[in-house]
Image: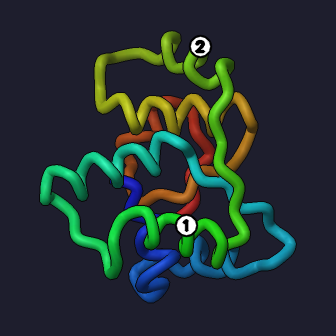
Amino acid sequence: MPHALIWTADDPSKLGPQAATELADPTNELVVSAGAIWEIAIKVGQGKLSLTMPFGEWMNKAITDLAATILLKIEHADAQTQLPGRGDPFDGLLAAQSNVERMVLVSNDAGLDPHGVQRLW
């Protein structure tokens, strides 16, 4: 679940202290995985997740307010094919993107650690 995006946009007090500090630093470039957007859309459509406004409005506002860019490249999907195990495909995409782009992944999910990501919380 892309909890970091939801909490950054709606309730930053739920973020870990280091993550909150780094996400608030205007010198850091923020990117949002296309996989995170897709996963949120699926969960909203299934009724498993509620947002403070309709999905499209909420996502556009979150991306704009965070001045974030959306990230997806073929190299990310290719790197995902090399990850061990058959876990959650969205987590796999996040791990692959983090590794390919050599970016820090903001997440409280320690299940991503075996994929070699640099994780911040």
Secondary structure of residue under mark 2:
helix
Residue 58: x and y in percent read 44, 72
* Relative horizontal placement of residue 100, taking residue 77 as reference (left or right): right
Residue drawn at x 47%, y 17% is 83
Q: CA distance from mark 1 to mark 2?
A: 28 Å
* Relative horizontal placement of residue 51, taking residue 5 as reference (left or right): left
- The three-letter amino acid code for the residue at tag 2 is Asp
Residue 45: x and y in percent read 21, 52
Pointer 2 local density, CA inside 10 Å: few below 14, some 14–19, many at least 20 = some
Circle nearer the N terminus (1, 2): 1
Of the pair 44 and 9, the residue shown nearer to us: 44
Pointer 1 local density, CA inside 10 Å: few below 14, some 14–19, many at least 20 = few
* Relative horizontal placement of residue 45, taking residue 2 as reference (left or right): left
* Relative horizontal placement of residue 7, taking residue 19 as reference (left or right): left
Report which residue position mark 1 lands on: 60
27 versus 99 height, above or below: below
Residue drawn at x 51%, y 20% is 80
Check contact, mark 1 vs mark 2: CB within 8 A: no
- The three-letter amino acid code for the residue at tag 1 is Asn
Of the pair 75 and 110, the residue shown nearer to us: 75
Q: Which residue in the rendered view is the most extreme toward the left?
A: 47
Report which residue position mark 2 lands on: 78
47 versus 90 height, above or below: below
